[in-house]
Image (cartoon, grey):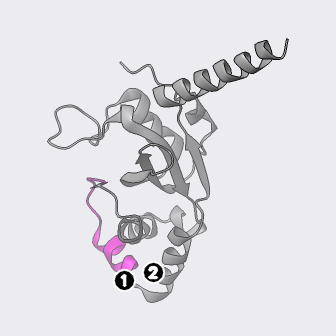
Amino acid sequence: MSMRDFSSIQELPKSPAVYALCAGDRVNDFVVYVGISSNLRSRIYQHLIMRDSSAVVESAPVQINVDSISSLKWWQHDDFQSRDRLEGAEIVAFEVLKPTMRSRGGVSASGQKQSTKSVFRDEMLRLFHSTATGSLKFPNIRDLARKLSELERRIDELESNE
């Protein structure tokens, strides 16, 4: 079991979203996984806390290493209340965000068709090229080491000024 602090997941909205799980060293984060959900909080909880989604289970041939996840970004849009539009948006997000791994869910024919409609597609391209609706950073051991080093430096400065 991970010692990671994912408590900030409770801050996530319970609404539909396209999301990206990112890994890296904060400076050079990359998109590991892009998925969709009708309830973002529940889905991210399933990935990172319960670890029972098809993307993270150990029996899967390819999986996300939850301990390497450094951040989450998500995009919301009024059109995401419609499942076919949410699925269509996911297809556009794959193209823009270029994840290492894509969600494993099948896209319906109506979702596939939605992704090709020019007005919708252009709007989704703008959405995914813009700043995400929200983001969370998940602390990891590197963050702890960096903070510890900074505290040690500040203590040294305080002690040298005495």
Q: Which residue is mark 1?
A: 116
Crowding at dot 1, Cα within 10 Å, few <14 / some 14-19 / many 20+, comes out as some
Q: Please state which of residues 81 and 64 is positioned toward the viewer in this rendering.
A: 64
First to last magenta residue range: 101-116
Residue shown at 64%/18% (left/top)?
152
Q: Are marks 2 and 1 in contact (CB under 8 Å)?
A: yes
Q: Judge from the rendering whether residue 139 lies leftward or rightward of residue 98; answer left or right.
A: right
Name above or below for residue 46 compared with residue 98: above
Q: Which residue is mark 2?
A: 121
Name above or below for residue 146 compared with residue 37: above
| Spot occupied by residue 15 in the image (x, y as percentages of width and height) | 57, 51
Q: Is residue 126 visible?
A: yes
Q: Is residue 39 visible?
A: no
Q: Judge from the rendering whether residue 151 lies leftward or rightward of residue 145; answer left or right.
A: right
Circle 1 sits in a helix, a strand or a loop, which is it? helix
Q: Amino acid at mark 1?
A: Thr
Which quadrant of the figure has residue 86? bottom left
| Spot occupied by residue 62 in the image (x, y as percentages of width and height) | 19, 44
Quadrant in the picture for the N terminus = top left
Quadrant in the picture for the C terminus = top right
How far apart marks 2 and 1 lie (CA) works out to 6 Å
Which quadrant of the figure has residue 148? top right
Q: Amino acid at mark 2?
A: Arg
Residue shown at 78%/15% (left/top)?
160
Question: Is residue 79 covered in magenta?
Answer: no
Q: Please state which of residues 46 and 110 is positioned toward the viewer in this rendering.
A: 46
Residue with the most extreme bottom position: 118
| Spot occupied by residue 123 in the image (x, y as percentages of width and height) | 53, 79
Name above or below for residue 31 compared with residue 143: below
Crowding at dot 2, Cα within 10 Å, few <14 / some 14-19 / many 20+, comes out as some
